[in-house]
Amino acid sequence: MCNYDYPSAAEVTPGGHIAVLQSPPASIIGDQSSTLDTGRDYRLRDQVGYAHTGDNNYLSKVHEEQMVEADRQFQPGNFQRIIPLPEAARQELCNICARLPHRLVMRELINIYFAEANWYFAMLEQHYFEKLYNYWCSLNDSSTEHGQVADVPPDLLHFSALIFHVLAVSLQFVSPDTNCSRALGVDSFNVRDHLSSNFSTSGVEIARILGTLDPTITAVQNDLMRAFWLKNCSRGREAWHALGGVIRTAQDLGLHQQSKVYQTPRSTLEETLTELWYDEYKRRLWIKLFSWDSHMTFSLGRPRAINVSDCTITPPLDCDIPADPSTRIPMTLAPHEPPSSFTPQLFQYAISQHAHEVMSLGAHKKNFIDYALIQGTHDRILSLLSDLPPVHRPMNPDTSWDASYPHIPKQRQQISTAANSLLMALHTPHARTHTASRHAATQAALATLDAQEQLFDLMATSYSSIYALCIYTLAAGIFLSVTTLEYPPADMGILHEILHAIRKAIHRLELAQERVSLAGPGSRLLKLCYQKMQTSAQARSGLQGTAAYGANPVAAASFMHAPFSGAHIEESPGQPSEILAYTSGSGISLSDGIPFDSTVMFEDITQPPYGSMGTGIRPG
């Protein structure tokens, strides 16, 4: 517990923060012009519409050289390009930044974000964030001391928006029993969510003011954090739109293309190493966008925003960025060195490339002719799993580092979830026509639920928004339910395993429903599926006899009649969710009148775009 003095909730007042900020998703700003864009002289390249990088035009070549120089200027103390703020914009930015909490509260929330969220999502690199944060604080202190706001570099303008979104996301993971929660007066989930929403809105307002004419790396990170925040709020469709804007901004900066780091006669070794690590940092940001775009496409049926043939970057190294990049050469880890926290992100990038290949060849659609490609992709995903460093391998891992690095056991389950959910999505469109795919998808779904169960137990689920746990659990649970109803397994022991996994999935969704709006309707749908499966299994039991239940018929038979464990799931007549939007066919209905038809649902999950998710969930 921290012992420094904290302001009380009543004392948390504006701390004299100045405006130092960023650019919003296209879906949010639409065609609105920002205060800074209006009346500005547009560069010839922007007037014509040329890309900032590329081989097709001279202006891009000139800009590429400027980008190299801009990278050298990034380090704190080396900022050279300043954007003058019109008085109206300056005042508006200052008014928004006045909403920031006390510096000590911000510091604790930032620490919570990096401790509780960034290990999984890897949106930010702490080294570069802290450098900008320290410079941003120094500029605030200087402006307060001299009573005026100085003009600042673009990255620092955008950083104020990023700060708001880091605070917004951190609040989704914070425990009520912390100094910062007490100082902010956060005593319930509703209060916390409301404050988190206010912080995110402030970040969006700053982005609107700054516009998109001078995008920066920090602008990309801010918009990505906005998309992440939306996803945690179960606002998947809005998150997808926001992600599209982030990708376009990143492409405008040329993050999808390999940068060139030059050793000049004026450069010292330390400066060159610093630039090499900064290039590594940019590539890590790009592969995050690439992986998320691939997930949205392959798992949620959305169109791709990234064309692989446009990307020329070299994959990042599997190592952590050092505390002082000027002292270490970028290289992979030696066997005796501590494990890399970046391994799960590289693994997701690798499987995302396979997902792009499958979609480019049309193999994600049913009735695909070359079924050998499906099996080949399956085998390559398994090879990627087996080639992981032993410490991150889900099966038979090296656990010698677990005590020192408590996130590693969670990252193993993160990797297992990513791999098996992709395998499930790969085979789902072919589950009707190929028995091998149906079996492979079933095993992958069971493995996904097992990984989700273990990850759920390892995370502080009482205090965090665990959207990632809910969506994968729901996807696998619906696939298993609908597939089992359409194709009851001959081995009733397999049915026992499926029913047991779905019962646990329902229980997890029950626990999460207060924090994740997706979890409530998801648990009700899985409960309905479970009841249908129980009815079907009981009918089969009467026809086949208890011997059909394998080695433990008593346990299996009692399981078919067992009530739900955990908290009671209320079937309240709430608003119908999109994930339950099945309107054709007959059968059992939910309490809100939405019909359930397993045949229709199975048809949905085995054809694009819904087949690519493998759940029958309408893309959100």
Image: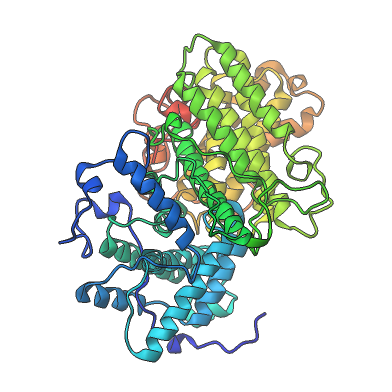
Horizontally, residue 322 falls left or right of residue 21, namely right
> Number of callouts in the render?
0
Q: Quadrant of residue 562?
A: top right
Q: Is residue 185 visible?
A: no
Quadrant containing the C terminus in the rendered view: top left
Quadrant containing the N terminus in the rendered view: bottom right
Q: Residue furthest front?
A: 265
Horizontally, residue 344 falls left or right of residue 52, namely right
Q: Position of residue 614 (x, y in %)?
A: 50, 29
Q: Position of residue 147 (x, y in %)?
A: 33, 90
Horizontally, residue 23 falls left or right of residue 536, namely left
Q: Residue furthest left?
A: 39
Q: Nearer the viewer, residue 231 or 542?
A: 231
Q: Is residue 577 above or below residue 377?
A: below
Q: Is residue 353 visible?
A: yes
Q: Quadrant of residue 115?
A: bottom right
Q: At x 20% / y 42%, what residue is drawn?
A: 48
Q: Is residue 574 above or below residue 605?
A: below
Q: Nearer the viewer, residue 618 or 508?
A: 618
Q: Residue furthest top?
A: 369
Q: Is residue 21 above or below residue 496?
A: below
Q: Position of residue 55 (x, y in %)?
A: 37, 34
